[in-house]
Amino acid sequence: MLSILQTALELGLIGSLTVLALFLSYTMLGVCDLSTDGCFTLGAAVGAVVAISGHPWLSLPAAMCAGVLSGFVTALLQTKLGIDSLLAGIIVNTGLYSINIAVMGGASLLNMNKTDTVFSMLKKLLAGTTVSNLYKLFVGLIAAALVVCFLSVFLRTRLGLAIHATGDNPDMVRSSSINPAFTTIVGLCISGSLTALSGCLLAQSQKSVNIDIGSGMVTIALASLLIGRAFAPMGGIPVRAIGAVVGAVVFRLVYAVALRLNMPAFMLKLVSSVIVVIAIAGPYLKARYPELHRRLTHARQKGGEGHA
Amino acid sequence: MLELDHISKTFNPGTVNEKRALHELTLRVKNGDFISIIGANGAGKSTLFNAIAGSFFTDSGRITLGGTDITLQPEHVRAKVIGRLFQDPMRGTAPGMTIEENLALAAGRGGWLGRITKADRALFRDKLAPLGMGLEDRMQHPVGLLSGGQRQALSLMMATINTPKLLLLDEHTAALDPATAEKVLNLTKQIVKDDKLTCLMITHNMQSALELGNRTLMMDQGRIIFDVEGEARAKLTVPDLLVLFREAAGRNLDNDRMMLS
């Protein structure tokens, strides 16, 4: 049981980077970036290829650069070429499928069993100590902490504020002499790099990349983000960013428990879809409740008069 | 100062919805002018502001501001020297961000990676205190919690925090209740006077159009049909304006929103 929880924690922390990427693109910038799945796989593929070629540390910045590139293309399509932001994400996502296979040298599966990765390096470093089997947890924890710190600082800078404002009121950004196209590009590049880093770490922790490693990731991350929002609905950026990480971990924990209760593993994506629907539709229906209530009571009153 | 040289704009050209919004419009605004603009709905008042602010490029003509040709400058570049307020108090501020963050973006101090400093906060307090709305003590509150009048006052601060060369006011008090509208208007007058701003103001209140500022323009069908200042303007009354409109436009000024008193 403990090992299941530990695995859930590891997966949650590694996946939380994607959730933080969505925190930037979805919550702050107001763009639902549907290229997330492909970008996640791109990071995994690039990271794996670089690690396999013998550069485990280089694999992280390499994956992030690939993510920046992916985010840049998505942003360019929607800001400069007049393509709707959802469609831009879908187009890039589709294109990335081919690119990811090309990166993996035409294969749809890469194995890293005998490859030095960030994880195996740390495992060697910790060998013999009492925490030797926690190496995956440490990598995830360090990565999540660094990204939370980065976002907390970055979103307080003028550029960060401008990105936040772009999602809030682009007119106001323009009248502050800032081009919203620029802030959208920067925001998506950063979120792309985080998504790719997340993919890179997940692949290395599993010691393999599959072309489908990122499929459904945007919905899973969105579900985590919305769970996190329930934990930290208000407050400053650090609180909300930590909330996003907590959301990612809680999602994985609940999922692990559900698996334990004999839910088949293939249900993961359905569960994440349902969570997203509930999290978004819930507040909407709650806001509409007075109207529904009015309809119901109105009908009842009318019926009452008829019978009188 | 601001020169509009034969600017024209036609929307949906070549379709049944073709609309000539600005028609060979020429206007010279002098430094320190405070101009009120009146006209019926669809006369082209807001379109004129959109053209000046760069929301779209004009089809023809030339716009220069302070000697610089801004005809083809993008909106966000012009925004450095042009401040603008809309009728809708929601347009000027970002509701999910704090008062302080809104002001910081408008002020644009420091580089891209600069953060809000103590000096910035002191400046914001100094700017907000004279509003008498207590906003200086609510700097960490999201703007979305403010009332329309408070948001419009904040928008005014944001538009003028870096003294603009030109201030465009598009019926910026029309959506506020009368008491708040008067407060925001007095505030506007004060800032325009203190900073010696050059200002264009669209209003549907003909009385205040004559009282405020030093010059009044009347627009109709994308043209300026009447332009008055100085002594001639001082003698004008609202009924005179209606007569002038009939003479210039060849029809009665019929506009439900136009307030005659």
Image (spheres, coloured by chain):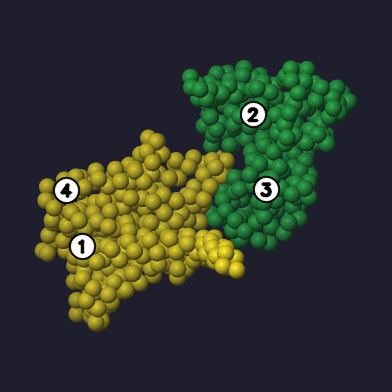
Q: In the rendered picture, chain A carries what hue?
A: yellow
What residue is disc 3 on? B152
Tell if the residue under mark 3 belongs to the same chain as the one under mark 4. Answer: no
Amino acid on which disc 1 is placed: Gln
The CA span between labels 1 and 2 is: 63 Å
Which residue lies at the image location 83% right of the left edge and 36% below the top edge? Answer: B261
The CA span between labels 2 and 4 is: 57 Å
Secondary structure state at the residue bearing disc 2? loop
Query: Do labels 1 and 2 touch, CB within 8 Å?
Result: no
What residue is disc 1 on? A204
Q: Residue furthest right?
A: B235
Q: Which chain is green?
A: B
- x and y, in percent, of residue B141 in the image: 61, 61
Q: Which chain carries label 4?
A: A
Mark 2 vs mark 4: in front? 2
Q: Mark 1 lies on which chain?
A: A
Secondary structure state at the residue bearing disc 1? helix
